[in-house]
Image (cartoon, rainbow, N blue to C red):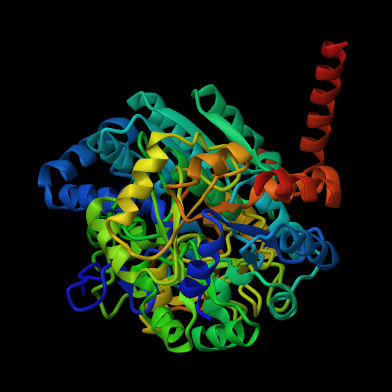
Amino acid sequence: MDIFDFSDGREGYYGEYGGVFLPEILHATIEELLECFRECKADPKFWQDYMALLQSYSGRPTPVTYLENLSRELGGAQIYVKREDLNHTGSHKVNNVMGQGLLTQRLGKTRVIAETGAGQHGFATATMAAKFGFDCKIYMGAVDVARQRPNVFWMENLGAEVIAVEDGQKTLKDAVNECMRDWVTNMADTHYILGTACGPHPFPEMVSWFQSVIGLEAREQIVKQAGRLPDRVYACVGGGSNAMGLFQGFIDEADVELVGCEAGGEGIGSYMHSARLAYDDASVGVAQGYKTYFLQNDEGNMNKTHSVAAGLDYIGVNPIFAHLHDQGKARFEAATDAEVKETLRLTMRTEGLIPALESTHGFVVALKEAATMKKDEIILVNMSGRGDKDIFTIADALDDAKWKSFIGGKADQYRAEKK
Amino acid sequence: MGLQAFIAERKQQKDLLVMAHVVCGYPSFEENMQELEIMAEAGVDIVELQFPFSEPSADGPLFVHANEQSLKAGTTVDQCFELMAEVSARFPFKVLMMGYYNTAFKMGEEVFVERLKAAGGVGFILPDLPIEEAGSLHKLAAEAGIEPIILMTPTSSDKRLAQLGAASRGMVYAVARKGVTGSKTNMGDDVVALIERCRQHTDVPIGVGFGVSSKQDMDFLRGHADMAIVGTAALKIWEQSGSEGLRGFFKELMA
């Protein structure tokens, strides 16, 4: 199945989802982008350059790790992990960013903008911009700036300007709106490096294409290491780029189940979550340039969303997943904040792995299901990012008393220096 | 009377019409009514009533704030249509719905067109609904005698303007510059060139908006455009100096 073959349907549509819903002023810019992307996709040299860049700069291929201790302890399925946390900048985000960096060069543009939630996409974009010599502005919700200061620190030190967005809910969706506003003004020299497989066509396809490297590698690796394809693959879903990346390696296999893990926040019925497909609270709508399931009210205004993981705290979902969900080709579950904290402790203690809070959502669902599966079954989890750089958020989430006292001490020291 | 005929009739009395803008429920529905009274007194020809949306990505800071505050105060689609019905019955200007496509999509395109017509609206401006996605809505609107206002922009190619022109009815909204609503536009040769390019591709009247804020802008547009579209500038005045300020603003603008 080629989900990106639009010859039977409408360009940029996955079932009834996707499309381009943008102000007329951006029409020419999107056309230009689409044309350039089509050229890149058709040019084997582009993909070779992209692979070479990821290998020399970002450390690809990332390994697949067998979790021997956890597999034994849970007594069910054999658990394997794709290690996107070992990428430069600490997450899968760098794949898409390097690809779009090469594309920005082809477009002849000199400035890039990006939205960021947890800060990992912003961090990756700032890194790429430094390497490629682009001017770079990162939009980040003020709430996220407050909860992800270490990433802001690195972005700024890498030479990017970070704008704290004070509109709306002050999170990822508001950063996306602000990027749109920048782009409608500066499209002549600016490319918008959208960080996930959402937004107007061709972004869902383009981001999926760049991230497909995850699934291509993982498929080969697991067949080599485990001797066969996995029974189920798991990935966390915010916008859905790491999950799309992984799933593309297995989408044509009827015997491999694709499981997307959304942010359940405070749980079903709390209305404080970001589960668009796993829970029943979302409905089809049009916002931020595309049509998909959004967490919105009856009049089409977006609801407040929540997750302990800023990178999953988003109103809409990748339109490809909305379609795969309708078709029954992927299953979506949710992990709550409380489950995420518990599972993070477990993976750290048992396997010495520190997944990002986002990625831990995938582990929650995978480990829960692994325990109920047979020993000869195999599962693969995408560890999309590493958690050690989110030390402030994780220490907060784990309510670590010693950390708090350390920070208190640091604060006292800085205050004394100020005087 | 349809929008285009109305514009033609008004144009017999003056050479440049004015379209003004109100965000429903901001600062409040009472204040909306006071603003609209002043606009009617001043002889404003058309008013866009913006239905607030939570993700107004084509708007600048002032309207973003207005959308947000209005929703925070609990503004509903019902209230917006009630306001529309009241002002269309009471004032001589024509009324358009302005907003984002999700508002229409969620209630259903058919219901949207029915309710718009029932409330006396004559058209709508949905800046995030490109013509490729607008087929069914434009068809429903045509059947109901409601005009979809097409936007033409400085970045539109001739080929694109031809497509937009073919879909245009009632009037065309020419976007004077790149960017979002609310910043200043330097009215100059670029704007004239844009209007001339638009004229080559449509026969309907052309309104120019984005950054129109002063009598100088009006004088500049006269003879080129059919209508000046004033949005942010009026809200800014209202916030700074209330009804006296707004009365003075329109008096000077339309002198």
Query: In the picture shown, does residue A385 fall above or below A204?
Result: above
Q: Where's residue A243, x and y in %?
A: 41, 61
Q: Where's residue A304, x and y in %?
A: 69, 64
Q: Is residue A23 left or right of residue A224?
A: right
Residue A170 visible within the image: no
At 26% across and 74% down in the image, what residue appears? A10
At 86% across and 22% down in the image, what residue appears? A412
Residue B160 visible within the image: yes
Place residue A264 in its image quadrant. Answer: bottom right
Please tell me which residue lies in front, B63 or A271: B63
Q: Where's residue B121, x and y in %?
A: 60, 78
Place residue A387 in its image quadrant. Answer: top right
Please tell me which residue lies in front, A168 or A215: A168
Query: In the picture shown, does residue A408 fall above or below B77?
Result: above
Please tell me which residue lies in front, B165 or B132: B165
Q: Is residue A341 left or right of residue A193?
A: right
Q: Is residue B92 left or right of residue B155?
A: right
At 37% across and 72% down in the image, what residue appears? B133
Q: Where's residue A351, x and y in %?
A: 52, 51
Please tell me which residue lies in front, B181 or A285: B181
At 57% across and 48% down in the image, what residue appears? B181
